[in-house]
Amino acid sequence: MMSIDALPEPKLLHLFDVLYDTRSVTRTAEQLGQSQPTISLWLGKLREQLGDPLFVRTPTGMAPTPQAEALITPCREVLESLRRLTAWEIGFDPASAQRRFRLCLSDASHITLLPRILEHLRRHAPGIRLDVARIDGNTERALETGEVDLAVGFVPWLGGGIYQQMLFPQDWICLVSPRHPRIGQTLPLKTYIREGHVFVSAGTGQKLLEAALTRNSIERQIVLELPGFLGLGAVIDSTDLIATLPRQIGETLASTHGLTVHICPFPIETFAVKQHWHVRYHQDAGNRWLRSTLLELFQCGNKVVSDQPES
């Protein structure tokens, strides 16, 4: 096996790659912008270094030897590695960047965070494409492989190698119609228990709400179950139902639909919305820029933490 020190220089590897495709010294010289004598000289050096003719003349062109057939795949892998190395971003210019970023967002964040993120990107990074996926059981693997750049939300199950940074805390509120016939300026616990409710199954924080209900021996009368927040504001506005939600999505819906906000009449554990990324992409210039952008837009002030020491 050839050692790294014995690898041919990149121009010879490039020659090998092009000649393998063209089977012609003339066309190889044209593609590489060199004279035929130069290509012949380089090919002689490559043959000497690899100890094989590599290509032999035939009526149909320069045919690769069995050794050349065996070497073409590793040659191209080396060239691709060199290409990635030379293309490594030491900086990121959002104004001129042409790149796709992929975010995993909670269902609520599609309403509360995404419009503001997109507005910022359209203004400051017009060449950026943004793809959005849901937070689910595949999120950790997607962060590790680079399929996803950031996950933003309450994702307490993420494991090793994941950095996290707090953006803002969340407590809980209740929404009712301003025309609710039995709820005025306050929402007592006995009224909360007596009235009908909307249950929204989406959201990673729902387990905290369910745990609080169990802990306080509260059994709600569920009249409507929704898979997400779409349409919830209109439902609350037009009915006498109550919705119990994290503050950010709750206040967003209240502002949009003119709903009344009440303090939740029993304690529910608070949580933090964070941005998460894998340690492999901690130094990636584009990822750093995206993280700093979300930090600028949403953070209340906290430092980066990780569940494993940074190397």
Image (spheres, grey):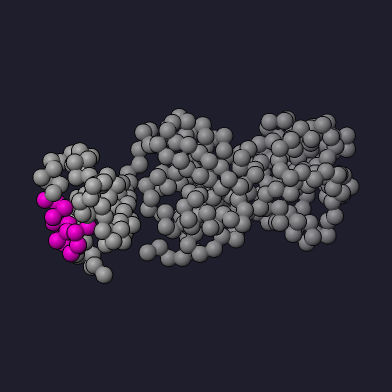
Depth check: give the residue in front, 84 or 176: 84
Q: Quadrant of the N terminus?
A: bottom left
- The quadrant holding residue 66 is bottom left
- The quadrant holding residue 209 is bottom right
Quick check: 294 above or below 209?
A: above
Type of secondary structure dominating the magenta stretch: helix
What segment carries the magenta color?
Answer: 41-54
Give the left or right position of residue 81, taking residue 128 as reference.
left
Image location (x, y in percent) of residue 215: 78, 61
Image location (x, y in percent) of residue 187: 81, 43
Image location (x, y in percent) of residue 210: 76, 56
Q: Residue at x 23, y 50 (%)?
A: 58
Quick check: 76 above or below 198?
A: below
Residue at the extreme bottom: 1
Q: Quadrant of the C terminus?
A: bottom left
Q: Residue at x 29, y 47 (%)?
A: 21
Image location (x, y in percent) of residue 144: 48, 57
Is residue 50 rendered magenta in the image?
yes
Q: Residue at x 18, y 64 (%)?
A: 51
Depth check: give the residue in front, 181 or 87: 87
Give the left or right position of residue 132, taking residue 33 as reference.
right
